[in-house]
Amino acid sequence: MRRDGYFQTGRVGFMTLLILGIVIFLGMHLVRVVAPSLRASVIERQGKNAWMGLYTLVSLVGLGLVIYGFGEARAVTGMLYNPPVFLKHLSLLLMLIAFICLAAGFLPAGRIAVAVKHPQILSIKIWALAHLLANGETSSVLLFGSFLAWAVILRISLKRRERAGETVLPVFKSASNDILAVVIGLAAFGLFVWKLHEWLIGVAPIVMG
């Protein structure tokens, strides 16, 4: 009984840390969307460097809580659904696309970036969806569902800024950057499947069977 009580307390505590981390991390990344006047006010009074320092510090605190809370909570939370094996294989294919989009977002714009408009946000949406397909435990659904919702909200916000006349879309530079994005994406995907995912997350991606 005492052990069950400890297990239940630990589960609630870890989930609380995970939720708190998600709120802090994603909340800070949504300030420009939901409270632009707050951001503008801090920059006006303290300067942009002060705002970036605060932004980075709060984001790191939130990210730390997310990493710790999720790492502990996933071991003790129950399952909401059990994904079939084929969805786990599909998630690997989606992750390859996510890596290529992410690389395209950091490079000078090629045709990939221009076509998808916001490659980094798209990579986050694909990443979150892929993990929702492959993981059905409560903590995973909470984490990846939150990031998917955040990316959707951010995409809607960028559409509004675009309609308002703000320049938010990538400008085409060279098609050679598409080749580079594919090469970098493939290399990063290969490294994650080979060792990095298991080293960083503690779980090896399913490749066979």
Image (spheres, helix red, strand yellow):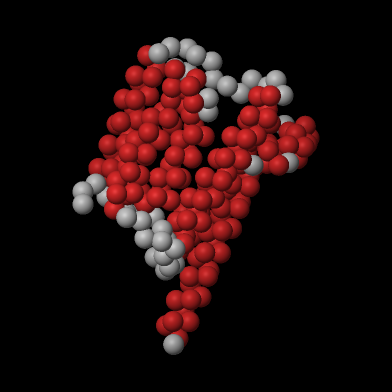
At x 73%, y 37%, the residue is 36
Left or right placement of residue 124 versus residue 204 in this view: right
At x 42%, y 30%, the residue is 101
Q: Is residue 181 visible?
A: yes
- In this view, the residue in front, 54 or 115, is 115
At x 65%, y 34%, the residue is 157
Left or right placement of residue 192 versus residue 44 in this view: left
Q: Is residue 68 visible?
A: no
Q: Position of residue 177 (x, y in %)?
A: 40, 17
At x 53%, y 28%, the residue is 118
Image-quadrant location for residue 152: top right
Left or right placement of residue 144 versus residue 96 in this view: right
Image-quadrant location for residue 77: bottom left
Q: Position of residue 203 (x, y in %)?
A: 32, 54
Image-quadrant location for residue 90: top left
- In this view, the residue in front, 105 or 129, is 129
Name of the residue lying farthest toward the bottom = 1
| 122 vs 26: above or below | above
Name of the residue lying farthest toward the top = 174
Name of the residue lying farthest toward the left = 208
Count of numbered badges drawn on the protein: 0
